[in-house]
Image: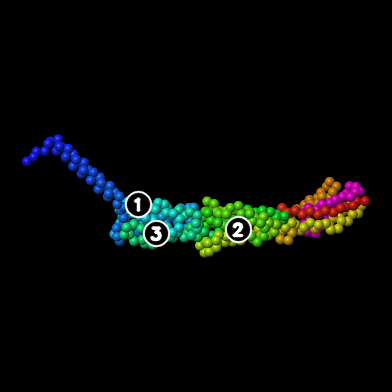
């Protein structure tokens, strides 16, 4: 029998220990690379934080994975997510207490995102759908400020607000304004982060304005019309002016314009440095005594409750 050198024996023993350790590490590394998947007969249910969302937005997507007994699968079970529209980030996630969560990033394309998920032998209960962008729009509200313009016309600010069926405002939605009169200047094409887009209407006549989004939940979604009115001026005119000596009798008319506001102020400036206010509207007369022989220019001023003013003038000859 050959005896092994003690030094050689110790070296051989250390070599065996090292090999055993390396083999153990190799086996551990190989096992760690194996993904943990849901067992057969498991169920996978998808939930989303919102079923409608604007463009360039995000929706939280959660997968609930339970074994056939109803208990959550082991922590670390890998779930892969897929969507027909937008981007899932990250594309897969691991479970904690049976839940795995990712985000749907909607991007700039409108449509319906159908989301699915898989994990091993788990059966997906159903896909979930998220209306994105224009496909999520259920309502367009339009406001104008002001809704009444001066008699010479003017400009009003238009604000359209776009929201889904739950009242959530939607960003990045293209909106178009329409009018039957006047000129439109749309300052923005798509809604901002507050779900709004603005424009301006300039008109000298009555106008009806609407805002519309194409491709909403029920096709094109249009706001109720907003009516922009243009105020009419009151009427002001002199009738006869009778002069006897230094005394002049003025007959005048002061009425609201067609569809206009009530007359609130009537006054006459007589042209000699004096005037008389608080006169009554309608067909009226007023007497004035001039201080000297001369030609005077009298001015009638009529103002209504909307602030619209009309004037009329006449020449009075005192001789």
Which residue is labeled 3 in the image? 116
Q: Secondary structure at mark 1?
A: strand
Quarter of the image where one finds residue 206: bottom right
Label 3 CA crowd tier, 10 Å (few <14, some 14–19, many 20+): many
Which residue is labeled 1 in the image? 94
How far across and down, in percent of the image, does residue 125 sit?
36, 62
Residue at x 47% of width, y 60% of height: 112
Residue at x 84% of width, y 46% of height: 273
Q: Secondary structure at mark 3?
A: strand
Q: Is residue 294 magenta-colored?
A: yes
Quarter of the image with the N terminus is: top left
One can see residue 134 in this view: yes
Q: Is residue 185 left or right of residue 137?
A: right
Residue at x 52% of width, y 59% of height: 134
Image: magenta residue range: 280-303
Residue closest to the eye, 222 or 84:
84
Which residue is labeled 2 in the image? 177
How far across and down, in percent of the image, does residue 284 sit?
81, 58
């Amino acid at each position: 029998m050959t005896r092994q050198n003690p030094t050689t024996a110790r070296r051989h023993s250390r070599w065996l220990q090292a090999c055993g350790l390396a083999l153990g590490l190799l086996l551990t590394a190989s096992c760690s690379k194996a993904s943990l998947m849901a067992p057969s007969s498991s169920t996978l249910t998808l939930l989303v934080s919102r079923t409608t969302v604007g463009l360039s937005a995000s929706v939280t997507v959660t997968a609930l994975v339970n074994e056939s007994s109803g208990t959550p699968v082991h922590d670390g079970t890998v779930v892969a997510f897929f969507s027909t529209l937008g981007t899932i980030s990250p594309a897969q996630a691991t479970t904690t207490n049976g839940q795995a969560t990712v985000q749907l990033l909607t991007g700039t394309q409108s449509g319906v995102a159908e989301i699915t998920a898989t994990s091993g032998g788990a059966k997906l209960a159903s896909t979930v759908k998220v209306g994105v962008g224009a496909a999520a729009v259920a309502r367009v509200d339009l406001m104008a400020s002001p809704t009444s313009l001066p008699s010479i016309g003017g400009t009003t600010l238009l604000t359209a607000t776009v929201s889904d069926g739950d009242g959530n405002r939607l960003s990045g939605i293209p909106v178009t304004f329409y009018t039957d009169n006047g000129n439109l200047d749309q300052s923005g094409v798509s809604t901002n982060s507050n779900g709004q887009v603005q424009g301006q209407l300039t008109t000298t006549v009555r106008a009806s304005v609407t805002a519309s989004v194409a491709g909403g939940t029920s096709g094109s979604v249009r706001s109720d019309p907003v009516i922009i009115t243009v105020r009419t001026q009151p009427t002001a005119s002199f009738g006869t002016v009778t002069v006897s000596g230094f005394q002049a009798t003025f007959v005048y008319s002061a009425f609201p314009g067609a569809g206009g506001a009530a007359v609130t102020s009537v006054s006459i400036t007589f042209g000699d440095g004096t005037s008389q206010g608080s006169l009554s509207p309608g067909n009226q007369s007023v007497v004035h005594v001039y201080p000297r022989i001369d030609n005077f220019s009298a001015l009638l001023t009529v103002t209504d409750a909307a602030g619209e003013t009309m004037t009329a003038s006449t020449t009075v000859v005192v001789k």
